[in-house]
Image (tube, rainbow, N blue to C red):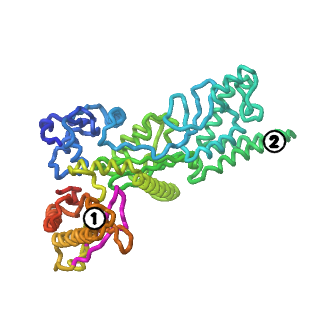
Amino acid sequence: MADPSTYRPAPGAIPEAPGVYRFRDAKGRVIYVGKANSLRPRVSSYFQDLANLHQRTRTMVSSAASVEWTVVQTEVEALQLEYSWIKEYDPRFNVKYRDDKSYPWLAVTVGEEFPRVMVGRGPKKRGVRYFGPYSHAWAIRETVDLLLRVFPMRSCSTGVFKRSAQIGRPCLLGYIGKCAAPCVGRVTPAEHREIVDDFCTFIAGQTNTHVKRLERQMQAAAAELEFEQAARLRDDVGALKRAMEQNAVVLADGTDADVINVADDPLEIAVQVFYVRGGRVRGQRGWVADRVDDAELPELLARFLIQLYDGETADAIPREVLLPRSPDDLDVLTAWLEDKRGSKVSVRVPQRGDKRALMETVARNAKQSLAIHKTKRASDFTTRSRALEEIQTALELDEAPLRIECYDVSNLQGTEVVASMVVFEDGLPRKSDYRRFVIRGIDGQNDVAAMHETITRRFKRLLDERAESTALDLGDLDDESGPVLIDPDTGRPRKFAYSPGLVVVDGGPPQVAAAQRALDELGIDDVPVVGLAKRLEEVWR
C-alpha cells in the first residue's frame, strides 16, 4: 500500500474550478474517477488523516500512486466527462450498476426503409427505437400479436422479407391481415411508415387517441350500413383495449415518468425502475452494484441517473423522474436531462398520493431484488471461494479459512454477560454450530475478561474432544489417520472437534490480545486471531 503523502499535490496546485479527477495505481491503471464543482476542496479531502477517511476511501487512496485532473467549463461538462471516463477505464473503485437480469426490449428498426418490430435483448443499436424493458418476453409478444391486427407493420426477418419480395408472394401474416405486406408492394414506404408511427405512439402511451379514432370510424361505418367494416373496427377496438389491460393503470392518463427507488446495505445497492407511459407501467428494470466507496444515497442516485440516460434519445427521457431522495447536483442533472430531451424535465421526490404509493411499490421490488441477488451470490461456490482467497491474502494466512468462528460479548448494564459464537464453513453460515456462552466468573462489565473466558472454554472443549477421540479404539485405522471426529454415541460430527482456520473477535487490540492469550495458555498455536472494530471497520491482529 502506498502512502498518500508521497503523491499529494503541492499546495495551490489544484485549481478552484469544475473538473474531473483520476487516481492511478503504480502500474498507471485508473482506479477511481470523480467529479467536483470545485476541484481543490474535493481532491484535497482525500489527503487528510487516513483515520478520518471511510475504510473504502482509505483503501482507494492507499492503492493509488498518483492523481491527475482535467478542468472543464461547466458542471454539466464535468458530469458528462466523469461518466465517459468511467465507461472507458472501468475503474475498480467506482460503483458500476449492472443489470440483475437480461430484460427484453420491444424494438422498432426505424432506420430501415420498411421498419420491423421485434422482441430482443442485449445492448441497444443505432437506428432502432426501443420500448420497455419488460419483465417477460412472452407478455410483450402477446401484446404485439394483438397490435399487429390494428397496426399491420412488418415483423418478419430480413431473409423472409427478401424471399417474399423475390417470389412476389407475402408470408402468412400478409394473408391473415397482420402485415400490410410491403414486400410485395401492397403499401408504399410512406404508407407503411405511417402504420409504424401509429404503432410507436400507441406503445409510447398515447392509447386513448387511437381507441377514440377507431370508435369514430366504427360509428361512421355503421351509419353508412357498412357492417362488415364496422365489425372489423369493433374487433380492432377490442384488441387495443385488451393490449391496454395488460398494463396496470397506476397514474393519471398522460403521465410519463420513470419511478426509481433503491435498497441497500453496507456492501451492495439494488436499483429498480418502473417505466410509466400514459399512466401505465410499460416496463421494469433492475440493477445491482457493489458499494466500493463511501458515497451516500444522493451521490449514488446522481451517478445512476447519468448511467441510465447517457446515450439515450430524446423520446426515451420522460417528463418526470421520481426519486426517493433528491440527488446531488440536482440543478445540473435537470439541465442535462432537459438538454437531451429538448423540453422541460421534472426531477423530484413525490410526497403523497398515487406517485408516492407507486414509489413504495418500487422500493419493495428493490428490496426483493437485493435479497434474491444476495441469495444467488451466497450459493455461488466460485464467488465464495474467491472471497475466502481474498481473506487469506489480506490477512496473510497460510491457507484459506474454510471454517471461521466469530465471537461477540454483550451485557445488560454490566450484568447477565453473554458471549455468542457464529460459524461460517466454506463461506456459508453453519447455524447448527452457533453457540452461546453464559459468562460466570466475571463481576461487572469487562469485555476483555469475558472474551478470554469464552475463547478458553471453547478451545478447551476442542482439546477435550480431540483427546477423547484419540483415546478410542480405532480398530482398522492406522496411527496416522488422526483423531476420530464422530461422536460414537450419536454417530454425528463432534461440533467442537473441528479447529477453525480463523477466529474473529469483536473489538480492537485488547480483545485480540485476550483471545490470543487464551490460545497460548492452552498450547494452541495454529489458529490465527483478528479483531474487527465496527466503528471504523478496522481489522486488528
The residues colored magenta run 419-439
> Would residue 157 be seen by someone viewing this image from the given angle?
yes
* Residue highlighted by disc 1: 483
**On screen, residue 114 above or below 2:** above
Q: Quadrant of residue 72?
A: top left
Between 470 and 298, the residue placed more toward the observer is: 470
Rendered location of residue 467, percent (x, y): 24, 70
Q: Residue furthest top?
A: 166
Q: Quadrant of residue 351?
A: bottom left
Distance in Å between CA atoms under marks 2 and 1: 88 Å
* Mark 2 surroundings within 10 Å by alpha-carbon count, few (fewer than 14), some (14 through 19), many (20 or more): many
Position of the N terminus, as image quadrant, is: top left
Query: Residue sitting at 27 percent across and 35 percent down?
Result: 30
Q: Does 423 appear in magenta?
A: yes
Between 430 and 65, the residue placed more toward the observer is: 430
* Mark 1 surroundings within 10 Å by alpha-carbon count, few (fewer than 14), some (14 through 19), many (20 or more): some
* Residue highlighted by disc 2: 230
Q: Residue furthest right?
A: 225
